[in-house]
Image: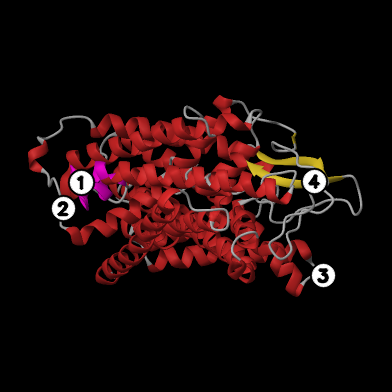
Amino acid sequence: MDKGIAQEEESLADTHGGTKGGATATSLRYNHDGISKVTSPKPKDISVEDGKAPPAACPLIEGHGEVHHPTSFLETLIHLLKGNVGSGMFAMGDAFRNAGLIASPLITLLLGVICVYSQHMLLSGARELQRRTRSPVLPTFAETMELSFKTGPPKLHGFAKTVRLWINVFLCVTQMGFCSVYFVFISDNLKMVMDYYNAELDIHIHMTIILLPIMLSCWIRDLKYLVPLSLFANVAMTVGIAVTLYYISQELPAPSTREYIAPWTKIPLFFGTAIYSFEGIGLVLPLQNEMKQPEQFTRRFGVLNIGMTIVTCLLVIMGFLGYLKYGDNVQGSLTLNLPQQDILAQAVQLTICLGILFSYALQMYVPIEILWPHVLKRWGPFKYSSLTDIIFRSSLVLITFILAEAIPHLSLFISLVGAVSSTALALFFPAIMDLAIHWESGLGHLKWLLWKDSFIICIGIIGFLTGTYASIEAIVQRL
């Protein structure tokens, strides 16, 4: 949905199945429609020891192995769009308030270009590492980072396992951050509707009320049972965006009544929210892997470029019209600015709330799949495995609930999550991976790869430091 059904797309294949000594290897990869099996001939040796690729005799199979339900160009484009459209898009009005009516679109377009370029770097790097290791399938995000260090400069070999761990840590932090944002988003919108009918409750009570249905949805262990909820969430988000655009495009004031360029001290808050809205990099590898013709994903007019162009345009339109319409009164979600007395606005708010609620379990699926195998390895096997699994899932939900209760400020929470974790995944790590892959083979004319990747890394570091500081400072002032 958002990164929402988005980073759950981070091919949850860090745990691979297979047959001992058999002829095939099978991995489970998550896509928008559920879990699909990817079966491919088992290579003789796809490990990389001491930075060396396996023998040339080991067969390389181009493509993605045998995908049981490969997707078409249009299907993949739809998956990419719904994976990048969500709560962050409704927050773009507040983001534009922090940068200004002219500066915001320009910075958004720049960030969009950089983020898409980083996604292309990740895809290109994964293909190169697949070639080097003679792997039958593309590696996941975490595997790509690990292999880039193993096959890169010798000084990086010892950090290969560590960088894979950090990718998984940031994925968990990002996803659980999204889930905490969902608590605040749902509660804010629900409170607004209920307050209109004089059923006034504190925001923390609203969070407590929605805790039970959210926790119950996370007890569902098989993704196929979440597909109907996912479909409803997609419809709800589409309707919500359409109706919100209708409201914010009515009776617009003159642009001269708004700030064109905001004070530079507010730019970091804009950066955090914008990068939160763009951060769907964990989605691209599994989506390409599921396509009937994977090469269509990265063409000039392929799925990635077309899809992210649409996403960028939507972000700019929502942000520009939202700030122009409401000015300094714009809320952390544009749905909170809709007229309270309109039945249509109330219906849209409640529909989006249900859509976000149904997306929660899919978002939480990623940290569960990353962390649960480590719990089993360290403390398992358990006598009551199902009960232990439920307790573990409930504990993760409670962590996100406590975070939301502690920071019930939607716009600042979104900016903090974007600055802390989304920046690292979308900008920092792909550039580091690109340098590691090409360091030994050459950095191009005048070492342009070094300059280009260093520029992206610097933007990531500056955004991380300033965005995190500004968000935490603003949160402390509001508490």
The type of residue carrying mark 4 is: Thr
Inter-mark Cα distance, 1 to 4: 49 Å
Closer to viewer: mark 3 or mark 2 = 2
Q: CA distance from mark 1 to mark 3?
A: 58 Å
Label 3: state its secondary structure: loop
> What amino acid is found at the position of numbered circle 2 in the picture?
Ala
**Secondary structure that dominates the magenta span:** helix
Lower position in the chain sequence, tag 3 or tag 4: 4
Residue of label 3: 383
Q: Is residue 239 left or right of residue 54?
A: left
The residue at the point 35 percent across, 35 percent down is: 314
Q: Which residues are magenta?
A: 92-106
In the image, which disc is placed on residue 277? Answer: none
The residue indicated by pointer 2 is: 262
Asked if labels 3 and 1 touch by Cβ distance under 8 angstroms, the answer is no
Query: Badge 4: few (under 14), some or many (20 or more) residues near its Cα, within 10 Å?
Result: some
Q: Residue beneath label 4, please?
A: 26
Residue 167 in percent (x, y) is at 56, 61
Q: Residue at x 20, y 29 (%)?
A: 250
Is the C terminus in the top left, top right, bottom left or bottom right quadrant?
A: bottom left
Q: Vertical placement of 258 versus 373: above or below? A: above
Q: Secondary structure at mark 2?
A: loop
Check the image and name the residue furthest to the front.
Answer: 446
* Alpha carbon separation for disc pair 2 and 4: 53 Å
| Residue 112 included in the magenta stretch of the image | no
Per the model, the C-alpha gap separating discs 3 and 2 is: 59 Å
**Callout 1: helix, strand or loop?**
helix
Q: Residues within 10 Å of mark 3 (few under 14, many from 20)?
A: few
Q: Amino acid at mark 1?
A: Ala
Marks 1 and 2 sit apart, C-alpha to C-alpha, by: 8 Å
Say which amino acid is labelled 3.
Lys
